[in-house]
Amino acid sequence: MYESLALEILSSHIVEGPSDPGPGDIVVAKPDLLLMNDITALLALRVIEETGAPVDCSRIRTLIVLDHYSPPPTARIATSYRLLRRFARRHGCALKDVGEGIMHQIAVEEEVEPGMLALGADSHTITYGALAVFSTGIGSTEAAYIMARGELWLKVPHTILARLEGRLEWPLTGKDLALQILSRTGGDGAVYASIEFTGPGLASLGVSDRLTVANMMVEGGAKTALFPVDKVLVEWMRRERGAVKPGWKRLAPRNGEPSIEVDLGELEPMVSEPPAPYNARPARELEGVEVDQVFLGSCTNARYEDLEAAARILKGRRVREGVRLIVTPASRRVYQKALETGVLGILHSAGAVITPPGCGACFGSTMGVAGDEEVVLSTSNRNFPGRMGSPTARIYLASPQTAAASAVTGVITDPRSLA
Amino acid sequence: MRVSGYAFKLGDSISTDDIIAGRYLYITDPGELASHIFENRPKIRSRIQRARRPIVIVAGRGFGYGSSREHAPLALKAFGVKAIVAESFHRIFYRNSINNGLLAVEAPGILGIVEEGEPITIDLDRGVVEASRGAIRVSGMPGYVKSILEAGGLREMLRRLAGGRSP
Protein backbone atom coordinates (compact mmCIF):
# COMPACT_ATOMS: atom_id res chain seq x y z
CA MET A 1 0.00 0.00 0.00
CA TYR A 2 1.38 3.39 -0.95
CA GLU A 3 1.76 6.12 1.65
CA SER A 4 -0.60 8.51 -0.14
CA LEU A 5 -3.91 7.99 -1.90
CA ALA A 6 -2.56 10.08 -4.78
CA LEU A 7 0.31 7.68 -5.41
CA GLU A 8 -1.92 4.66 -4.85
CA ILE A 9 -4.16 5.80 -7.70
CA LEU A 10 -1.49 7.27 -9.94
CA SER A 11 0.74 4.17 -9.73
CA SER A 12 -1.77 2.05 -11.62
CA HIS A 13 -1.94 4.59 -14.48
CA ILE A 14 1.77 5.17 -15.13
CA VAL A 15 3.05 4.22 -18.58
CA GLU A 16 6.52 5.76 -18.30
CA GLY A 17 8.66 6.91 -15.40
CA PRO A 18 10.76 5.67 -12.47
CA SER A 19 9.94 2.18 -11.18
CA ASP A 20 9.29 3.39 -7.64
CA PRO A 21 7.96 6.94 -8.11
CA GLY A 22 7.86 9.44 -5.27
CA PRO A 23 6.84 13.07 -4.77
CA GLY A 24 8.45 15.40 -7.31
CA ASP A 25 9.09 12.69 -9.91
CA ILE A 26 7.76 13.21 -13.43
CA VAL A 27 5.70 10.33 -14.81
CA VAL A 28 3.71 9.83 -17.99
CA ALA A 29 0.22 8.56 -17.22
CA LYS A 30 -2.77 7.25 -19.12
CA PRO A 31 -6.02 8.75 -17.80
CA ASP A 32 -9.34 6.90 -17.64
CA LEU A 33 -11.27 10.01 -18.60
CA LEU A 34 -10.62 13.31 -20.38
CA LEU A 35 -13.02 16.20 -19.89
CA MET A 36 -13.33 19.61 -21.53
CA ASN A 37 -15.79 22.45 -21.19
CA ASP A 38 -17.13 24.71 -23.95
CA ILE A 39 -14.28 27.20 -23.48
CA THR A 40 -11.31 24.90 -23.14
CA ALA A 41 -12.58 22.51 -25.84
CA LEU A 42 -12.83 25.37 -28.31
CA LEU A 43 -9.18 26.23 -27.74
CA ALA A 44 -8.19 22.54 -27.93
CA LEU A 45 -9.98 22.42 -31.29
CA ARG A 46 -7.94 25.34 -32.53
CA VAL A 47 -4.72 23.64 -31.41
CA ILE A 48 -5.72 20.49 -33.29
CA GLU A 49 -6.56 22.48 -36.42
CA GLU A 50 -3.33 24.47 -36.29
CA THR A 51 -1.04 21.54 -35.64
CA GLY A 52 -2.87 18.94 -37.71
CA ALA A 53 -2.52 16.50 -34.81
CA PRO A 54 -4.33 13.20 -35.34
CA VAL A 55 -7.29 12.78 -32.98
CA ASP A 56 -8.60 9.47 -31.71
CA CYS A 57 -11.13 9.77 -28.88
CA SER A 58 -11.80 6.03 -28.85
CA ARG A 59 -8.68 5.31 -26.75
CA ILE A 60 -9.56 7.54 -23.80
CA ARG A 61 -13.19 8.30 -23.03
CA THR A 62 -13.56 12.00 -23.86
CA LEU A 63 -16.42 14.19 -22.68
CA ILE A 64 -17.17 17.75 -23.79
CA VAL A 65 -19.74 19.67 -21.74
CA LEU A 66 -21.29 22.94 -22.94
CA ASP A 67 -21.65 24.61 -19.55
CA HIS A 68 -19.84 27.95 -19.17
CA TYR A 69 -21.79 30.16 -21.59
CA SER A 70 -24.80 27.89 -21.74
CA PRO A 71 -27.39 28.66 -23.08
CA PRO A 72 -25.38 30.81 -25.50
CA PRO A 73 -25.97 34.54 -25.02
CA THR A 74 -24.52 35.65 -28.39
CA ALA A 75 -24.53 34.44 -32.00
CA ARG A 76 -20.74 34.12 -31.97
CA ILE A 77 -20.87 31.72 -29.02
CA ALA A 78 -23.80 29.81 -30.50
CA THR A 79 -21.75 29.36 -33.68
CA SER A 80 -18.77 28.06 -31.71
CA TYR A 81 -21.10 25.53 -30.07
CA ARG A 82 -21.90 24.24 -33.56
CA LEU A 83 -18.18 23.65 -34.14
CA LEU A 84 -17.93 21.68 -30.90
CA ARG A 85 -20.91 19.48 -31.74
CA ARG A 86 -19.48 18.73 -35.19
CA PHE A 87 -16.06 17.94 -33.71
CA ALA A 88 -17.57 15.57 -31.12
CA ARG A 89 -19.59 13.73 -33.79
CA ARG A 90 -16.64 13.38 -36.13
CA HIS A 91 -14.17 12.12 -33.55
CA GLY A 92 -16.40 10.06 -31.30
CA CYS A 93 -16.29 12.24 -28.17
CA ALA A 94 -19.28 12.29 -25.86
CA LEU A 95 -20.96 15.70 -25.66
CA LYS A 96 -23.41 17.11 -23.12
CA ASP A 97 -25.37 19.91 -24.68
CA VAL A 98 -26.98 23.12 -23.43
CA GLY A 99 -28.98 22.64 -20.23
CA GLU A 100 -27.50 19.27 -19.20
CA GLY A 101 -25.50 20.97 -16.47
CA ILE A 102 -22.01 21.61 -15.17
CA MET A 103 -19.24 19.28 -16.32
CA HIS A 104 -18.18 18.41 -12.78
CA GLN A 105 -21.68 17.53 -11.65
CA ILE A 106 -22.26 15.34 -14.72
CA ALA A 107 -18.91 13.61 -14.13
CA VAL A 108 -19.91 12.80 -10.56
CA GLU A 109 -23.40 11.63 -11.54
CA GLU A 110 -22.37 9.45 -14.48
CA GLU A 111 -18.68 9.09 -15.20
CA VAL A 112 -16.14 8.72 -12.40
CA GLU A 113 -15.62 6.08 -9.74
CA PRO A 114 -13.01 5.51 -7.01
CA GLY A 115 -9.48 4.80 -8.21
CA MET A 116 -9.80 6.53 -11.57
CA LEU A 117 -7.42 9.10 -13.02
CA ALA A 118 -9.48 11.92 -14.56
CA LEU A 119 -7.85 14.85 -16.34
CA GLY A 120 -10.01 17.82 -17.21
CA ALA A 121 -9.40 21.11 -18.97
CA ASP A 122 -11.04 23.02 -16.12
CA SER A 123 -9.43 23.78 -12.77
CA HIS A 124 -12.41 22.48 -10.78
CA THR A 125 -11.86 18.97 -12.15
CA ILE A 126 -10.30 18.52 -8.71
CA THR A 127 -13.89 18.08 -7.40
CA TYR A 128 -14.03 14.31 -8.02
CA GLY A 129 -11.43 13.73 -5.31
CA ALA A 130 -14.49 13.45 -3.06
CA LEU A 131 -15.07 10.10 -4.79
CA ALA A 132 -11.43 9.01 -4.32
CA VAL A 133 -10.65 9.91 -7.92
CA PHE A 134 -7.25 11.42 -8.73
CA SER A 135 -8.64 14.30 -10.74
CA THR A 136 -6.85 17.46 -11.70
CA GLY A 137 -7.02 20.39 -14.07
CA ILE A 138 -4.98 20.70 -17.25
CA GLY A 139 -4.84 23.11 -20.20
CA SER A 140 -6.36 22.94 -23.66
CA THR A 141 -3.15 22.03 -25.48
CA GLU A 142 -2.75 19.19 -23.01
CA ALA A 143 -6.30 18.04 -23.69
CA ALA A 144 -5.44 18.07 -27.40
CA TYR A 145 -2.30 16.07 -26.65
CA ILE A 146 -4.31 13.44 -24.78
CA MET A 147 -6.73 13.19 -27.71
CA ALA A 148 -3.73 12.58 -29.97
CA ARG A 149 -1.50 10.43 -27.75
CA GLY A 150 -3.69 9.02 -24.98
CA GLU A 151 -1.26 10.08 -22.24
CA LEU A 152 0.22 13.10 -20.45
CA TRP A 153 3.07 13.95 -18.06
CA LEU A 154 2.32 14.62 -14.41
CA LYS A 155 4.46 15.50 -11.42
CA VAL A 156 3.81 13.21 -8.46
CA PRO A 157 2.40 15.47 -5.71
CA HIS A 158 3.54 15.64 -2.11
CA THR A 159 0.87 15.08 0.52
CA ILE A 160 -0.81 17.42 2.98
CA LEU A 161 -2.79 15.34 5.46
CA ALA A 162 -5.92 17.03 6.82
CA ARG A 163 -7.42 15.44 9.91
CA LEU A 164 -11.06 16.09 10.78
CA GLU A 165 -12.37 15.68 14.33
CA GLY A 166 -15.86 16.19 15.75
CA ARG A 167 -19.19 16.27 13.93
CA LEU A 168 -20.58 18.60 11.29
CA GLU A 169 -24.05 19.80 12.35
CA TRP A 170 -26.71 21.88 10.56
CA PRO A 171 -26.41 24.66 9.44
CA LEU A 172 -22.65 24.10 9.05
CA THR A 173 -21.50 22.70 5.72
CA GLY A 174 -18.58 21.55 3.65
CA LYS A 175 -18.35 25.13 2.36
CA ASP A 176 -17.60 26.46 5.83
CA LEU A 177 -14.95 23.76 6.22
CA ALA A 178 -13.43 24.61 2.82
CA LEU A 179 -13.26 28.33 3.61
CA GLN A 180 -11.80 27.58 7.06
CA ILE A 181 -9.04 25.45 5.48
CA LEU A 182 -8.34 28.10 2.80
CA SER A 183 -8.02 30.80 5.45
CA ARG A 184 -5.08 28.74 6.76
CA THR A 185 -3.42 27.70 3.47
CA GLY A 186 -3.79 31.06 1.78
CA GLY A 187 -3.81 31.13 -2.01
CA ASP A 188 -0.67 29.10 -2.50
CA GLY A 189 -0.12 27.06 0.67
CA ALA A 190 -1.10 23.84 -1.07
CA VAL A 191 0.45 24.43 -4.50
CA TYR A 192 1.23 21.11 -6.22
CA ALA A 193 0.05 19.14 -3.18
CA SER A 194 -2.41 16.33 -2.76
CA ILE A 195 -4.59 17.28 0.22
CA GLU A 196 -5.80 14.01 1.74
CA PHE A 197 -8.58 13.85 4.33
CA THR A 198 -8.70 11.54 7.29
CA GLY A 199 -10.04 11.34 10.84
CA PRO A 200 -13.29 10.51 12.66
CA GLY A 201 -14.95 13.72 11.42
CA LEU A 202 -15.31 12.12 7.98
CA ALA A 203 -18.27 10.10 9.25
CA SER A 204 -20.44 13.24 9.45
CA LEU A 205 -19.30 14.67 6.13
CA GLY A 206 -21.63 13.50 3.35
CA VAL A 207 -20.52 13.15 -0.26
CA SER A 208 -22.17 16.43 -1.27
CA ASP A 209 -20.14 18.28 1.39
CA ARG A 210 -17.00 16.42 0.37
CA LEU A 211 -17.51 17.51 -3.24
CA THR A 212 -17.68 21.14 -2.08
CA VAL A 213 -14.49 20.76 -0.05
CA ALA A 214 -12.52 18.99 -2.78
CA ASN A 215 -13.78 21.55 -5.33
CA MET A 216 -12.39 24.50 -3.38
CA MET A 217 -8.99 23.07 -2.49
CA VAL A 218 -7.73 24.27 -5.87
CA GLU A 219 -8.16 27.80 -4.46
CA GLY A 220 -5.27 26.90 -2.14
CA GLY A 221 -3.30 25.64 -5.12
CA ALA A 222 -3.84 21.91 -4.59
CA LYS A 223 -3.33 19.50 -7.47
CA THR A 224 -5.78 17.02 -6.06
CA ALA A 225 -7.89 16.72 -2.89
CA LEU A 226 -8.66 13.15 -1.97
CA PHE A 227 -11.25 11.67 0.33
CA PRO A 228 -10.79 7.95 1.09
CA VAL A 229 -13.21 5.16 0.32
CA ASP A 230 -15.12 4.75 3.57
CA LYS A 231 -18.60 3.70 4.64
CA VAL A 232 -20.09 7.05 3.66
CA LEU A 233 -18.74 6.85 0.11
CA VAL A 234 -19.52 3.16 -0.38
CA GLU A 235 -23.14 3.70 0.65
CA TRP A 236 -23.39 6.72 -1.64
CA MET A 237 -21.93 4.82 -4.60
CA ARG A 238 -24.36 1.96 -4.00
CA ARG A 239 -27.36 4.29 -3.79
CA GLU A 240 -26.50 6.84 -6.49
CA ARG A 241 -24.49 4.77 -8.93
CA GLY A 242 -25.52 1.21 -8.19
CA ALA A 243 -21.97 -0.10 -8.03
CA VAL A 244 -19.42 -1.13 -5.42
CA LYS A 245 -16.11 -2.81 -6.34
CA PRO A 246 -13.75 -4.82 -4.10
CA GLY A 247 -10.68 -3.04 -5.52
CA TRP A 248 -11.74 0.16 -3.77
CA LYS A 249 -10.51 -1.26 -0.44
CA ARG A 250 -6.96 -0.13 -1.24
CA LEU A 251 -8.25 3.46 -1.14
CA ALA A 252 -8.83 3.35 2.63
CA PRO A 253 -7.86 6.39 4.76
CA ARG A 254 -4.15 7.06 5.26
CA ASN A 255 -2.72 7.95 8.64
CA GLY A 256 0.27 10.08 9.50
CA GLU A 257 1.21 13.44 10.88
CA PRO A 258 -1.55 15.89 9.87
CA SER A 259 -0.55 19.43 8.93
CA ILE A 260 -4.16 20.62 8.96
CA GLU A 261 -6.50 19.74 11.83
CA VAL A 262 -10.10 20.91 12.09
CA ASP A 263 -12.66 20.17 14.79
CA LEU A 264 -15.94 20.23 12.88
CA GLY A 265 -17.81 20.84 16.13
CA GLU A 266 -16.05 24.20 16.51
CA LEU A 267 -16.61 25.33 12.93
CA GLU A 268 -18.55 28.55 12.31
CA PRO A 269 -20.37 29.74 9.18
CA MET A 270 -17.65 31.36 7.08
CA VAL A 271 -17.73 34.09 4.43
CA SER A 272 -14.93 34.89 2.02
CA GLU A 273 -14.43 38.60 1.33
CA PRO A 274 -13.19 39.98 -1.97
CA PRO A 275 -10.76 39.81 -3.66
CA ALA A 276 -9.83 36.15 -3.09
CA PRO A 277 -11.44 32.95 -1.77
CA TYR A 278 -8.86 32.42 0.99
CA ASN A 279 -9.82 35.80 2.46
CA ALA A 280 -12.35 34.09 4.73
CA ARG A 281 -13.66 34.97 8.19
CA PRO A 282 -16.68 34.07 10.34
CA ALA A 283 -19.97 35.30 8.86
CA ARG A 284 -20.86 37.05 12.13
CA GLU A 285 -17.94 39.45 11.59
CA LEU A 286 -19.46 40.58 8.30
CA GLU A 287 -23.09 40.76 9.39
CA GLY A 288 -24.81 43.86 8.09
CA VAL A 289 -23.05 44.10 4.71
CA GLU A 290 -25.89 44.89 2.26
CA VAL A 291 -26.28 42.63 -0.76
CA ASP A 292 -27.87 43.31 -4.17
CA GLN A 293 -27.80 39.77 -5.50
CA VAL A 294 -27.54 36.31 -4.01
CA PHE A 295 -26.39 33.50 -6.31
CA LEU A 296 -27.10 29.89 -5.43
CA GLY A 297 -25.21 27.98 -8.07
CA SER A 298 -21.89 26.62 -9.47
CA CYS A 299 -19.95 23.36 -9.30
CA THR A 300 -19.24 24.17 -5.66
CA ASN A 301 -22.75 24.42 -4.27
CA ALA A 302 -25.71 23.76 -6.57
CA ARG A 303 -26.41 20.11 -5.88
CA TYR A 304 -29.76 18.90 -4.66
CA GLU A 305 -28.58 19.03 -1.03
CA ASP A 306 -27.65 22.70 -1.49
CA LEU A 307 -31.00 23.65 -2.98
CA GLU A 308 -32.79 21.71 -0.28
CA ALA A 309 -30.81 23.48 2.47
CA ALA A 310 -31.72 26.87 1.00
CA ALA A 311 -35.39 25.81 0.76
CA ARG A 312 -35.35 24.75 4.41
CA ILE A 313 -34.44 28.32 5.36
CA LEU A 314 -36.64 30.05 2.75
CA LYS A 315 -39.78 28.02 3.41
CA GLY A 316 -42.50 30.40 4.63
CA ARG A 317 -40.18 33.38 4.14
CA ARG A 318 -39.63 35.88 1.31
CA VAL A 319 -36.51 37.17 -0.40
CA ARG A 320 -36.09 40.75 0.78
CA GLU A 321 -37.46 43.44 -1.53
CA GLY A 322 -34.68 44.85 -3.69
CA VAL A 323 -32.57 41.67 -3.47
CA ARG A 324 -32.33 39.25 -6.39
CA LEU A 325 -31.93 35.55 -5.61
CA ILE A 326 -30.75 33.59 -8.64
CA VAL A 327 -30.79 29.80 -8.43
CA THR A 328 -28.93 27.77 -11.06
CA PRO A 329 -29.12 24.01 -10.41
CA ALA A 330 -25.91 22.10 -11.17
CA SER A 331 -27.47 19.63 -13.58
CA ARG A 332 -30.64 18.43 -15.26
CA ARG A 333 -30.80 15.60 -12.73
CA VAL A 334 -30.57 18.05 -9.81
CA TYR A 335 -33.21 20.28 -11.41
CA GLN A 336 -35.54 17.34 -11.97
CA LYS A 337 -35.24 16.06 -8.41
CA ALA A 338 -35.75 19.54 -6.94
CA LEU A 339 -38.79 19.89 -9.18
CA GLU A 340 -40.26 16.58 -8.04
CA THR A 341 -39.68 17.08 -4.31
CA GLY A 342 -41.10 20.60 -4.28
CA VAL A 343 -37.79 22.30 -3.45
CA LEU A 344 -37.93 24.44 -6.60
CA GLY A 345 -41.50 25.42 -5.73
CA ILE A 346 -40.42 26.64 -2.29
CA LEU A 347 -37.53 28.64 -3.75
CA HIS A 348 -39.75 30.10 -6.46
CA SER A 349 -42.51 31.04 -4.01
CA ALA A 350 -39.93 32.80 -1.85
CA GLY A 351 -39.04 35.00 -4.82
CA ALA A 352 -36.09 33.20 -6.41
CA VAL A 353 -35.35 33.31 -10.14
CA ILE A 354 -34.70 29.73 -11.31
CA THR A 355 -32.43 29.42 -14.37
CA PRO A 356 -31.54 26.41 -16.51
CA PRO A 357 -28.56 24.32 -15.29
CA GLY A 358 -25.03 25.48 -16.15
CA CYS A 359 -22.19 27.59 -14.74
CA GLY A 360 -24.34 30.71 -15.00
CA ALA A 361 -23.50 33.78 -12.97
CA CYS A 362 -20.37 32.24 -11.37
CA PHE A 363 -18.60 32.82 -14.65
CA GLY A 364 -19.92 36.35 -15.16
CA SER A 365 -21.12 35.90 -18.72
CA THR A 366 -24.76 34.93 -18.61
CA MET A 367 -27.85 34.51 -16.38
CA GLY A 368 -27.09 37.03 -13.63
CA VAL A 369 -24.04 39.16 -14.44
CA ALA A 370 -23.16 41.68 -11.70
CA GLY A 371 -23.16 45.41 -12.47
CA ASP A 372 -20.84 48.20 -11.35
CA GLU A 373 -20.35 48.38 -7.59
CA GLU A 374 -23.02 45.76 -6.91
CA VAL A 375 -22.56 43.44 -3.96
CA VAL A 376 -23.07 39.74 -4.63
CA LEU A 377 -23.19 36.94 -2.09
CA SER A 378 -22.47 33.74 -3.97
CA THR A 379 -22.21 30.04 -3.20
CA SER A 380 -19.58 29.72 -5.95
CA ASN A 381 -15.82 29.42 -5.62
CA ARG A 382 -14.09 32.59 -6.82
CA ASN A 383 -14.47 36.25 -5.93
CA PHE A 384 -11.71 37.86 -7.96
CA PRO A 385 -12.51 41.34 -9.34
CA GLY A 386 -14.62 40.98 -12.48
CA ARG A 387 -15.28 37.28 -11.94
CA MET A 388 -19.06 37.73 -12.04
CA GLY A 389 -19.19 40.73 -14.37
CA SER A 390 -18.15 44.27 -13.54
CA PRO A 391 -14.62 44.63 -12.08
CA THR A 392 -16.09 46.95 -9.46
CA ALA A 393 -18.72 44.45 -8.23
CA ARG A 394 -17.85 43.01 -4.80
CA ILE A 395 -18.29 39.25 -4.43
CA TYR A 396 -18.61 37.42 -1.12
CA LEU A 397 -18.56 33.61 -0.97
CA ALA A 398 -20.57 31.51 1.47
CA SER A 399 -22.61 28.33 1.98
CA PRO A 400 -26.17 27.88 0.63
CA GLN A 401 -27.46 28.29 4.21
CA THR A 402 -25.70 31.62 4.66
CA ALA A 403 -26.78 32.68 1.16
CA ALA A 404 -30.45 31.85 1.83
CA ALA A 405 -30.46 33.60 5.23
CA SER A 406 -28.85 36.67 3.67
CA ALA A 407 -31.39 36.70 0.82
CA VAL A 408 -34.13 36.95 3.44
CA THR A 409 -32.55 39.76 5.45
CA GLY A 410 -30.82 41.64 2.60
CA VAL A 411 -27.56 41.73 4.55
CA ILE A 412 -24.87 39.13 5.20
CA THR A 413 -26.37 36.96 7.93
CA ASP A 414 -25.10 34.11 10.07
CA PRO A 415 -27.62 31.38 9.21
CA ARG A 416 -27.74 30.15 12.80
CA SER A 417 -30.00 33.13 13.53
CA LEU A 418 -32.64 31.94 11.01
CA ALA A 419 -32.08 28.20 10.98
CA MET B 1 17.99 29.20 -23.57
CA ARG B 2 18.36 32.90 -22.72
CA VAL B 3 15.62 35.53 -22.60
CA SER B 4 15.96 39.25 -21.84
CA GLY B 5 13.47 42.07 -21.38
CA TYR B 6 12.31 44.85 -19.11
CA ALA B 7 10.79 44.12 -15.74
CA PHE B 8 7.07 44.69 -15.21
CA LYS B 9 6.35 44.13 -11.53
CA LEU B 10 3.19 42.61 -10.04
CA GLY B 11 2.22 41.41 -6.56
CA ASP B 12 0.95 38.09 -5.17
CA SER B 13 -1.91 35.87 -6.37
CA ILE B 14 -2.35 37.36 -9.85
CA SER B 15 -5.20 35.25 -11.18
CA THR B 16 -6.00 34.11 -14.69
CA ASP B 17 -9.29 36.03 -14.24
CA ASP B 18 -7.11 39.13 -13.78
CA ILE B 19 -5.13 38.38 -16.93
CA ILE B 20 -8.13 37.65 -19.19
CA ALA B 21 -11.76 37.94 -18.12
CA GLY B 22 -14.19 35.04 -18.48
CA ARG B 23 -16.40 37.06 -20.78
CA TYR B 24 -13.75 36.87 -23.54
CA LEU B 25 -13.01 33.16 -23.46
CA TYR B 26 -15.02 32.36 -26.58
CA ILE B 27 -12.10 34.06 -28.37
CA THR B 28 -9.29 31.78 -29.52
CA ASP B 29 -7.19 34.26 -31.53
CA PRO B 30 -4.19 35.28 -29.35
CA GLY B 31 -4.04 38.82 -30.77
CA GLU B 32 -7.70 39.43 -30.05
CA LEU B 33 -7.29 38.02 -26.53
CA ALA B 34 -4.27 40.30 -25.99
CA SER B 35 -6.43 43.36 -26.72
CA HIS B 36 -8.47 42.56 -23.58
CA ILE B 37 -5.56 41.88 -21.26
CA PHE B 38 -6.03 42.80 -17.56
CA GLU B 39 -9.45 44.40 -18.15
CA ASN B 40 -10.55 43.15 -14.73
CA ARG B 41 -7.62 45.09 -13.20
CA PRO B 42 -7.80 48.55 -14.85
CA LYS B 43 -4.73 49.95 -13.05
CA ILE B 44 -2.54 47.07 -14.15
CA ARG B 45 -3.98 47.38 -17.66
CA SER B 46 -3.02 51.02 -18.06
CA ARG B 47 0.48 50.35 -16.67
CA ILE B 48 1.22 47.38 -18.92
CA GLN B 49 0.00 49.29 -21.97
CA ARG B 50 2.78 51.83 -21.32
CA ALA B 51 5.42 49.24 -20.33
CA ARG B 52 8.73 49.02 -22.20
CA ARG B 53 8.99 45.95 -24.43
CA PRO B 54 9.90 43.15 -24.54
CA ILE B 55 8.22 42.61 -21.21
CA VAL B 56 9.39 40.22 -18.50
CA ILE B 57 6.74 39.96 -15.78
CA VAL B 58 8.27 39.84 -12.32
CA ALA B 59 5.71 38.75 -9.77
CA GLY B 60 5.18 37.56 -6.22
CA ARG B 61 3.71 34.33 -4.96
CA GLY B 62 1.07 32.20 -6.64
CA PHE B 63 1.15 33.68 -10.15
CA GLY B 64 -1.55 32.28 -12.44
CA TYR B 65 -4.04 31.64 -9.62
CA GLY B 66 -7.40 30.05 -10.44
CA SER B 67 -8.95 29.03 -13.71
CA SER B 68 -7.25 26.67 -16.17
CA ARG B 69 -7.84 29.07 -19.08
CA GLU B 70 -4.90 28.71 -21.45
CA HIS B 71 -6.11 31.98 -22.93
CA ALA B 72 -4.09 33.69 -20.16
CA PRO B 73 -0.57 32.73 -21.29
CA LEU B 74 -1.68 33.06 -24.94
CA ALA B 75 -2.82 36.63 -24.31
CA LEU B 76 0.36 37.52 -22.40
CA LYS B 77 2.58 36.09 -25.12
CA ALA B 78 0.68 37.86 -27.91
CA PHE B 79 0.86 41.11 -25.93
CA GLY B 80 4.66 40.96 -25.92
CA VAL B 81 5.49 39.20 -22.67
CA LYS B 82 8.65 37.13 -23.21
CA ALA B 83 8.89 35.47 -19.82
CA ILE B 84 7.45 35.43 -16.31
CA VAL B 85 9.65 35.19 -13.26
CA ALA B 86 7.72 34.72 -10.02
CA GLU B 87 8.25 33.72 -6.43
CA SER B 88 5.93 30.78 -7.19
CA PHE B 89 3.36 29.65 -9.77
CA HIS B 90 0.05 27.86 -9.77
CA ARG B 91 0.49 24.58 -11.55
CA ILE B 92 -1.98 24.75 -14.45
CA PHE B 93 -0.80 28.21 -15.49
CA TYR B 94 2.81 27.02 -15.31
CA ARG B 95 2.04 24.03 -17.54
CA ASN B 96 0.06 26.13 -19.99
CA SER B 97 2.94 28.61 -20.29
CA ILE B 98 5.57 25.99 -20.95
CA ASN B 99 3.26 24.18 -23.37
CA ASN B 100 2.96 27.37 -25.42
CA GLY B 101 6.67 28.15 -25.29
CA LEU B 102 6.26 31.02 -22.82
CA LEU B 103 9.13 30.83 -20.34
CA ALA B 104 7.99 30.63 -16.69
CA VAL B 105 10.69 30.55 -14.03
CA GLU B 106 10.31 30.20 -10.29
CA ALA B 107 12.84 32.44 -8.51
CA PRO B 108 12.18 33.07 -4.79
CA GLY B 109 13.45 36.53 -3.87
CA ILE B 110 13.12 37.94 -7.38
CA LEU B 111 11.10 41.02 -6.34
CA GLY B 112 14.08 42.22 -4.30
CA ILE B 113 16.68 42.34 -7.09
CA VAL B 114 14.93 44.28 -9.82
CA GLU B 115 13.13 47.60 -10.18
CA GLU B 116 10.25 48.35 -12.48
CA GLY B 117 11.37 48.87 -16.08
CA GLU B 118 14.94 47.64 -15.54
CA PRO B 119 16.58 45.06 -17.78
CA ILE B 120 16.37 41.46 -16.60
CA THR B 121 17.82 38.29 -18.13
CA ILE B 122 16.92 34.66 -17.62
CA ASP B 123 19.66 32.23 -18.56
CA LEU B 124 18.24 28.73 -18.30
CA ASP B 125 21.43 26.95 -19.28
CA ARG B 126 23.37 28.60 -16.45
CA GLY B 127 20.33 28.40 -14.15
CA VAL B 128 20.35 32.08 -13.21
CA VAL B 129 18.17 35.21 -13.34
CA GLU B 130 20.18 38.46 -13.49
CA ALA B 131 19.17 42.06 -12.84
CA SER B 132 20.78 45.31 -11.70
CA ARG B 133 20.85 44.48 -8.02
CA GLY B 134 22.00 40.92 -8.18
CA ALA B 135 21.41 37.45 -9.49
CA ILE B 136 19.29 34.55 -8.28
CA ARG B 137 20.11 30.93 -8.93
CA VAL B 138 17.10 28.98 -10.05
CA SER B 139 16.70 25.24 -9.69
CA GLY B 140 16.85 23.40 -12.97
CA MET B 141 13.65 22.35 -14.69
CA PRO B 142 13.02 18.61 -14.76
CA GLY B 143 14.52 17.23 -17.97
CA TYR B 144 11.13 16.23 -19.35
CA VAL B 145 9.70 19.72 -18.86
CA LYS B 146 12.79 21.37 -20.33
CA SER B 147 12.57 19.15 -23.38
CA ILE B 148 8.99 20.33 -23.96
CA LEU B 149 10.08 23.96 -23.68
CA GLU B 150 13.04 23.38 -26.01
CA ALA B 151 10.80 21.68 -28.55
CA GLY B 152 8.79 24.92 -28.62
CA GLY B 153 6.06 23.66 -26.34
CA LEU B 154 3.57 20.82 -26.42
CA ARG B 155 1.94 22.54 -29.39
CA GLU B 156 5.12 22.00 -31.42
CA MET B 157 5.25 18.38 -30.30
CA LEU B 158 1.73 17.93 -31.65
CA ARG B 159 2.90 19.37 -34.96
CA ARG B 160 5.61 16.71 -35.08
CA LEU B 161 3.04 14.02 -34.34
CA ALA B 162 0.98 15.28 -37.25
CA GLY B 163 4.03 14.87 -39.48
CA GLY B 164 4.26 11.21 -38.46
CA ARG B 165 7.31 11.83 -36.28
CA SER B 166 7.78 10.97 -32.63
CA PRO B 167 6.90 13.89 -30.37
Image: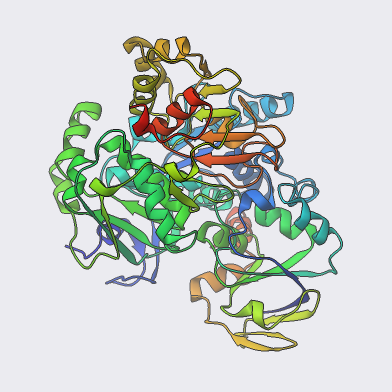
Q: At 74% across and 80% down in the image, what residue appears? A: B120
- Nearest the camera: A162 or B33? A162
| Image quadrant where one finds the N terminus of chain A | bottom left
| Image position of A74 (left or right of A316) | right
- Nearest the camera: A33 or A344? A344
| Image position of A202 (left or right of A64) | left
The location of residue B150, given as percent across then percent down, is: 62, 72
Image quadrant where residue B146 sits: bottom right
- Nearest the camera: A250 or B146? A250
The location of residue A406, given as percent across then percent down, is: 48, 29
- Is any atom of residue A330 visible in this view? no
The location of residue B50, given as percent across then percent down, is: 87, 62
Q: Is residue A112 above or below residue B93?
A: above
The location of residue B95, given as percent across then percent down, is: 55, 61
Image quadrant where residue A82 sits: top right
- Is any atom of residue A131 visible in this view? yes
Q: At 68% across and 83% down in the image, what residue appears? A: B113
